[in-house]
Amino acid sequence: MAVTFAPTQLSQATKTSPQLAFPSVGIAGSGTAMMAMACYLTGRGYPVEVLARDEYGDSTSGASSVKASGAIKGQFDRTTLGIKPDNLLQNCSHLFIVAESSMYKEIAWSLSPWLKARHLVILYGGGIGASLEFERLLLANGVSGAQVVEIDPLFHCRKENSATIKVDAMRQWGQYSGTSPASTFECESALKRLLPKLDSAQNFLSRGLSDYQSLLYPINYTFGADAEMGAALLELINAGAEKEDSVLNHLEREFNMIAEAYSTSQMSTVVNIRRMYGAITSSIAEAVSMAPLQPASWDHMIKNLTESVSTSYVPLYELARLAHLTTPAIDSVISMSAVMCGVDLLSQGRTLNRLGLEGLSQREIIKILNG
């Protein structure tokens, strides 16, 4: 079956003068996606300041800037990387958090003394319910009133060297969600200004279920790289399912079941990836295989798998149990991933307790999701 891509326009992000009518934008976190976001926003004319928690924040680097190439082309002035949290939040009313969810607790603690109700916190990716978890972490540190919203990860990027980020692809479409429909609506104007390619999701469950990069990408490539474990996963799923099928098809059916149980819309992966990248395919396997893939070491793949299962599959598992749904594919992914990662993912992942939803009924969670 032939697979084709619709033409996509290169996203130009060359540095321009800051648009004074727009607020300054802060970014805190680490990694290539953080710097890709800095280059992208700077190229769109925003004043951007970055609190880097990795080598990109090293002021001793010989390079005066970090540049992005590929799907976006732009650069970010490295001299602004040394900003302190208090100055960052004094200067910026909008703050992106581009980091693994395991860093959320530390980041919330370090920023909380200066976070106010005027701030909008934007989580880049983070799995299902990232906004709920981060809001609870802020509340635990005495911060109330700040808006928290989660967005789909937009960039497929990799590090070329300490001064260059290669962006292999940027999504042409994505979604965002706050902790409730009301908070999603309140964030709309700011999000659409900053990231025009984003649309509002029905709720945070809908956004998370449409984020194939968190749900399917790590599963497909990590288990695909280990033929023995991949075969064992498929055998385990088919043993508990009503009929034999591929891992991805089993998973998508279970995602749809959970979405329906919680009165939440769900988009097929084929349609999802078509909207994101213009990839025209006829099956979920083709769609996922045609999405941009960065070279990764085995350790990096395991790290991504741990993040994916902890933040997406664990909350789905608990939501399914609450709704009395049978999900052999989700259960098997969690079990096999725990073996591969050497981590008890069910106990250490994003449980309903971490989201502040433990003890609630299915009906009560539906009300939180949909207002």
Image (spheres, rainbow, N blue to C red):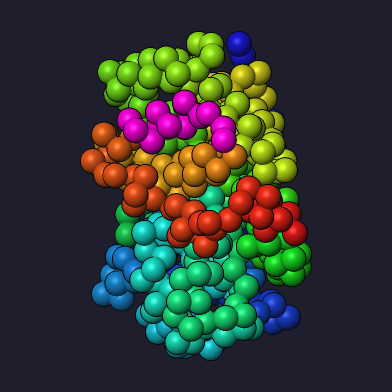
From the image, give the main secondary structure of the stretch colored magenta: helix
Q: Quadrant of the C terminus?
A: bottom right
Q: Is residue 342 left or right of residue 325?
A: left
Write the residue at 40% across / 28% down. Answer: 332
The location of residue 221, given as percent across then percent down, is 40, 30
The location of residue 127, given as percent across then percent down, is 50, 50
The location of residue 135, given as percent across then percent down, is 53, 69
Q: Is residue 44 left or right of residue 242?
A: right
Q: Above or below — where is 22 with respect to 269? A: below
**Front-most of 62 and 278?**
278
Residue 299 picture quarter: top left
Decide whether residue 335 is among the magenta residues.
yes
**Residue 167 visible here:** no
Give the extent of the magenta segment.
324-336
Residue 253 picture quarter: top right
Q: Is residue 343 left or right of residue 181?
A: left
Write the residue at 32% across / 25% down. Answer: 225
Decide whether residue 24 is among the magenta residues.
no
**Residue 359 visible here:** yes
The location of residue 41, given as percent across then percent down, is 59, 65
